[in-house]
Image: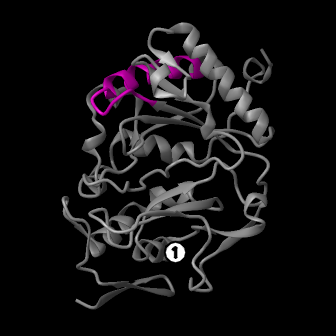
Amino acid sequence: MAKTTTTTGTREVSISRPDKLLWPDAPVTKQDYADYLRAVADDMLPWLHDRPVTMVRAPDGVGGGKRYYQKAAPTYAPSWVRTTRIPAPSAGRDVDYVVCQDLPTLLWLGNQAVLEFHPAPVRRDRLDRPDLMVVDIDPPGDDAFAMAVEVAFLVLEVLDDLGLPYGVKTTGGKGLHIVMPIERRVDQQELRAAVTRLTDIVIERRPDLVTDAFRKAKRGGRVMLDPSRNGTGATIVALFSARARADATVSFPVAPEELGSVSPTDFTLRTAPSLLRRPGPKRWRALADERGRLPRELLRSG
């Protein structure tokens, strides 16, 4: 099949080579992927809107060939694909990042074999003021998800004490993300310091289980909390983004009460559309309109 065309509002988006396998082991074709993006768009787009997106592209799928991160929008992108220009001093130039505002853009990017979406925790109108705070929970191995869940409950206890709204999602890999929408009152350096303080509080409660050591050799089999997901240049895999993994897992929203009964492999390009009525997606829909204020306990130094 040469291509299919789908109409979204006033736009027509073509899916070239719709039978091409992007996830051969799943199996998931390019048309399957487009159908997935359409199914989850209403829940995915609010967490992409106005955010610069770093893309992971795999033109030949996950089975082989090139796989690379791409920050700049393709030069051949249609005029209706929105971008935002961000200075990149290390590259000596400005970079035009895609901002995924609507379903046609999402489908067009899917047709370009963008398999992963990694938005920034800032919006394009105030790049210096983050509106998301992220706790990245990284267990020591693929078989240690239960440890990630135990640490997630520790983090949630602290957040409940601080009165911050939050959502939990699988990363599509072995760990979890806890995401907190916040008021845009601090800069990226202040936010990084706040997450570091939050990490310290959790470690103080369970130093036998939790570490902030970046090098695996220093973690001693413990779960790492990574504050670096907050700060200049940081990104986080988007809610409902697929992962460029053979098992076609996706980053899926999970309610706290579900944590003890799920596995990251429960949520794939094949299964996720049928799970949108679960408590996790419902919680994240409400979360999109919430904003918490960082408390003094996290903003103080030391």
Quarter-of-image position of residue 183: top right
With 262 as the anchor, is 212 left or right in this view?
Answer: right
* Local crowd size for mark 1, using a 10 Å CA cut-off: few (<14), some (14–19), many (≥20): many
Q: Which residue is drawn at 47% across and 20% down?
A: 219
- Percent across and percent down for residue 216 are 46, 27
Label 1: element kind: helix
Secondary structure that dominates the magenta span:
helix
User: Where 301 sits versus 250, above or below?
Assistant: above
Q: Nearer the viewer, residue 71 or 11?
A: 71
- Whether the magenta-drawn stretch holds residue 183 is answered as no
**Colouring used for the render:** one colour
Query: Label 1 is placed on what type of residue?
Result: Thr
Q: Which residue is drawn at 56% across and 15% down?
A: 202
With 150 as the anchor, is 103 left or right in this view?
Answer: right
- Percent across and percent down for residue 155 are 52, 21
The residue furthest front is 217
User: Where 276 sits versus 218, above or below?
Assistant: below
The residue furthest bottom is 2
Please identify the quadrant where the C terminus is shown.
top right
Please identify the quadrant where the N terminus is shown.
bottom left
Q: Which of 25 and 4 is in front in this view?
A: 25
With 100 as the anchor, is 191 left or right in this view?
Answer: right
- Whether the magenta-drawn stretch holds residue 139 is answered as yes
- Residue range highlighted in magenta: 138-159
- Give the residue pinned by disc 1: 105
User: Where 13 sits versus 93, above or below?
Assistant: below
Q: Residue at x 19, y 63 (%)?
A: 27
